[in-house]
Image: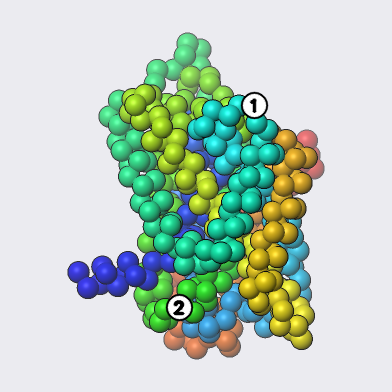
Amino acid sequence: MLNFKKNLKNLGPGLLFASMAIGTSHLVLSTKAGAQYGWLMVIPIILANVLKYPFFEFGVRYTNVTNKTLIEGYLNRGKGYLWFYALITLVTTFTILAALYTVTAGLFINLFGVGHSSIAMVALILFLIISALLIFGKYRFLEISLKFVVSILFIALLVTTILVLAKGPDTHVPGFKPQPVFNEVGILFLIGLIGWMPTSVEASSWISLWSIEKWKTQNKPSLKESLQEFNIGYTITAVLAIFFMIIGWFTLYGTNIQLSNNAVSFADQVVRLFTQHIGSWAYLFIAISAFATMFSTCMTAHDALARVSLDIITLLKPKSNWFSTKAAFALGVLVLTLINFVVIAAFSANMGNLVALATFVSFVVAPVIGYMNLKNVTSKDIDPKFQPGKKLKFLTYAGILFLSCFALYYFYIIITK
């Protein structure tokens, strides 16, 4: 009982990671994976979660042992590492938040029946609300609120998955032919799925920054406790990804129904996937749960990108202390709001293009960032007794090789088509 209470108290960075991950990669991509390709998609989902695990674990390990962020570790390896990560963060700034807010705006329009509103205007309202919560509520508010959101979502998804499995898969339409996985369309979808499953690898530094922030108001846990807390969050993300995939598989696979790329239509389709198995009475409950999930994902990603951007600038301009102030954080949050509102207004309601661009970038750079994280945790910054063991190193190399080969195969398709 004492260990349970201690683990509950330590919940923070791992929980924020889970909340951030259970967004577009799960609600959009996992559901589509099951709907379009059936049970086969459980293989890439499990592979992505297993092979990318070390990349994120190293963010927890490095920060706990050194009291430094992963980004500081990149600078210790050489300024080229830091500049590369800064470039990736710049691309991420223009894609990930815009994609997340677009989906969330679609859910909001669907939930409250404000179909006359544009995606861009609803997204702007969400940007302003979340910006205010982050600036005035700070990290503590983020952590406490997410404990409720993730718990509610897990229960809702567990109930829905059990009911879906009990009912069995919907009957295939006459003449149904499964979509091929290994053609250009299938490979592009796999890149999106694996690139953002459980989330983008550059988010490993986000966990690092959240850990530092949490320890400002709470005693730092041991390495073992930090890894246990992270593993809880990581396991939740993996299990929920499979839940979403099963729901898409059992309800849409073989029906020739396509999930829309329009954010509002997609939101309605996904919510109805749940309610047709639970009952129409559950529509409001499921819609609110889905919206709360995406809202919390937007909050965590927005918070993390502001912190990461400021951390990079601070390291590149060490003579200035201003970028580590509360005022700088508030400005960073507002600048991200402005940039991503412009992106959403330009892309309109077509979230497909945004998600595709964001996931492609994440997929291509994943093995590079994975290698950078490995260099951090095997450097002289960490005492050898706290460095990863042989099994974890082997898994890291396997993940780097797997993602690299997949990326090369993709480029081969593009060049030869």
Q: Is residue 107 shown to the viewer in this render? A: yes
Q: What amino acid is found at the position of numbered circle 2 in the picture?
A: Thr
Q: Quadrant of residue 28?
A: top right
> Could you say where residue 357 lies in the image, as x and y percent from the top left?
71, 45
**Disc marking residue 217:** 2
Where does the N terminus fall, quadrant-wise?
bottom left
User: Which residue reaches farthest left?
Assistant: 1
Q: Which residue was labeled with disc 1? A: 116
Q: CA distance from mark 1 to mark 2?
A: 45 Å
Q: What amino acid is found at the position of numbered circle 1 in the picture?
A: His
Q: Quadrant of residue 103?
A: top right
> Could you say where residue 325 lies in the image, as x and y percent from the top left?
65, 77
**Element carrying mark 2:** loop
**Disc marking residue 15:** none
Residue occupying image coordinates x 43% and y 66%: 12
> Is label 1 or label 2 in front?
1
Q: Quadrant of residue 105?
A: top right
Residue occupying image coordinates x 47% and y 46%: 293
- Comes first in the chain, label 1 or label 2: 1
Crowd tier of the residue under label 1, counting other residues whose Cα lies within 10 Å: few below 14, some 14–19, many 20 or above = few
Q: Is residue 357 above or below residue 168?
A: below
Left of 301 or right of it: where is 274? left
Residue occupying image coordinates x 69% and y 54%: 337
Left of 205 or right of it: where is 327? right
Residue occupying image coordinates x 47% and y 21%: 254
Residue closest to the eye, 85 or 23: 23
Where does the C terminus fall, quadrant-wise?
top right
Residue closest to the eye, 273 or 361: 273
Q: Is residue 42 shown to the viewer in this render? A: no
Circles 1 and 2: CB atoms closer than 8 Å:
no
Crowd tier of the residue under label 2, counting other residues whose Cα lies within 10 Å: few below 14, some 14–19, many 20 or above = few
Q: Is residue 95 above or below residue 387?
A: above
